[in-house]
Image (cartoon, grey):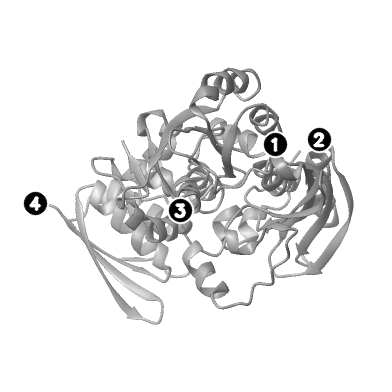
């Protein structure tokens, strides 16, 4: 799980990219509090072999689940 | 010399990316009474780059203001970019800057030397433009911001608005795109130094040479490409002129690194905002998403988008080649046929 809350763009997507490069996880949960980070991480996921779903978990807080495409 | 402070770390969003979105702005302005004046030739109801007021039969004032948070860490460089960006609105109207006033917001923590360097950068560009700085206003703020209110002169018969494009015109863009994406990558130290330096060099380049070239020809419309991105500003031109713009995607100058960062999701918030505002009016069938991203990418101190009559297109291209080598012919203007306002080929 990556907790990128408190980080502004583009840091959250950079943190995700580093984790994917390091461990290529089958699934990865990411917490963010910047709507732009949701869009950037979703864009990264789709271009790099992952599906991404996001949901709002609180006031301006979001959780993304990245799942490796079959 | 070592940089003691990193200006961009003091700001939440950078450059023209901090601009309030076009959709939000339209909502905020909706319903405000517009006072008319027969000499106010271009007012805020026109969504243009600057206001224009006729003083006499052969003189009109071009008035504009622009300021934003740091887009570069070096204060001198930030000052230069902010000034080049503010001056650009006068050039986009076909005018020549004459006098400017500083707008400055500074945090208490910002060292005096850095503030001085910032202003020195601004002065250098205003003087290069042939204008004078006559004063300004400074306030304390949590994050730094800088820009200028600029007044220029133009002949009332030679004003170039964004609303005059005509079917058959040829479109030129005078600076490459991708600046918002590349400076966003730089915030994470991902942008190669040579690529970033090239971006900054373009941002500090005045649109003076492009303006001086275009006013020699039959130009019907002009705007500068800034916070709304190429497609946001092109949409304003298309709607204002009642026409359709057809853009040749392969001719659009986009640095390959910007496309690479876009694929990685390194994109500024303003790109998504611009896309949401304009995409319903854009036909982008078959155009890769990362290329579209670059076309919605907010630019700071971007180039001029020029619509010139077809008969003068080759001559303008030749003139621009001499002084604005980055300029490209990027498309044409056609009749609006109740379809998309902008077609990407």
Q: Residue at x 42, y 71 (%)?
A: A33
Q: Residues within 10 Å of mark 3 (few under 14, many from 20)?
A: some
Calculate the distance from the C-alpha at mark 3 to the C-alpha at mark 4.
45 Å
Q: Are marks 2 and 1 on the same chain?
A: yes
State which mark lies toward you, 4 or 1. 1
Query: Chain ID for label 2?
Result: B
Could you tell me how many numbered marks the image carries? 4
Query: Chain ID for label 1?
Result: B
- Residue B344: x, y in percent? 33, 40
Tell which circle, 2 or 3, labels the residue nearer the N-terminal end. 2
What residue is shown with label 2? B128
Q: Are marks 2 and 3 on the same chain?
A: yes
Viewport quadrant of the N terminus of chain A? bottom left
State which mark lies toward you, 4 or 2. 2
What residue is shown with label 1? B206
Calculate the distance from the C-alpha at mark 2 to the C-alpha at mark 3.
34 Å
Which of the pair B298/B65 is nearer the observer?
Answer: B65
Q: Which of the labelled discs sits on residue A50, or is there none?
A: none
What residue is shown with label 4? A70
């Amino acid at each position: 799980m990556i907790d990128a809350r408190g980080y502004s763009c583009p840091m959250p997507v950079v943190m995700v990219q580093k984790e994917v490069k390091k461990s290529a996880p089958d699934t990865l949960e990411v917490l963010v509090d910047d709507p732009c980070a949701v869009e950037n991480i979703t864009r990264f996921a789709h271009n790099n072999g992952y599906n991404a779903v996001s949901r709002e978990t609180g006031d301006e807080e979001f959780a993304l689940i990245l799942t490796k495409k079959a | 010399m070592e940089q003691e402070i990193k200006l961009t770390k003091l700001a939440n969003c950078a450059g023209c990316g901090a601009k309030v979105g076009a959709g939000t702005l339209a909502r905020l302005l909706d319903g405000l009474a517009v006072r008319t004046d027969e000499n106010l030739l271009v007012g805020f109801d026109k969504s243009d780059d600057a206001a224009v007021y006729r003083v006499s039969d052969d003189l009109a004032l071009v008035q504009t203001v622009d300021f934003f948070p740091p887009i570069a860490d070096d204060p001198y460089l930030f000052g230069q970019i902010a000034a080049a960006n503010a001056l650009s609105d006068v050039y986009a109207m076909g005018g020549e800057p004459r006098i400017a006033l500083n707008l400055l917001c500074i945090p208490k923590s910002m060292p005096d030397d850095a503030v001085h360097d910032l202003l020195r950068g601004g002065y250098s560009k205003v003087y290069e433009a042939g204008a004078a700085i006559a004063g300004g206003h400074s306030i304390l703020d949590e994050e730094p911001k800088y820009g200028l209110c600029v007044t220029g002169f133009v002949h009332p018969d030679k004003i170039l608005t964004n609303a005059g494009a005509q079917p058959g015109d040829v479109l030129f863009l005078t600076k490459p795109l991708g600046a918002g994406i590349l400076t966003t990558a730089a915030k994470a130290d991902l942008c190669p130094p040579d690529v970033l330096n090239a971006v900054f060099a373009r941002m500090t380049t005045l649109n003076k040479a492009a303006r001086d070239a275009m006013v020699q020809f039959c130009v019907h419309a002009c705007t500068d490409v800034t916070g709304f991105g190429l497609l946001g500003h092109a949409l304003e031109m298309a709607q204002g002129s009642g026409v359709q713009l057809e853009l040749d995607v392969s001719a659009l100058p986009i640095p390959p690194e910007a496309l690479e960062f876009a694929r990685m999701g390194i994109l500024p918030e303003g790109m998504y905002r611009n896309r949401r505002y304009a995409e319903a009016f854009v036909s982008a069938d078959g155009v890769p998403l990362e290329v579209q991203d670059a076309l919605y990418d907010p630019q700071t101190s971007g180039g001029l988008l020029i619509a010139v009559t077809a008969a003068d297109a080759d001559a303008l291209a030749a003139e621009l080649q001499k002084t604005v080598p980055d300029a490209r012919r990027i498309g044409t203007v056609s009749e609006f046929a109740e379809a998309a306002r902008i077609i990407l080929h």
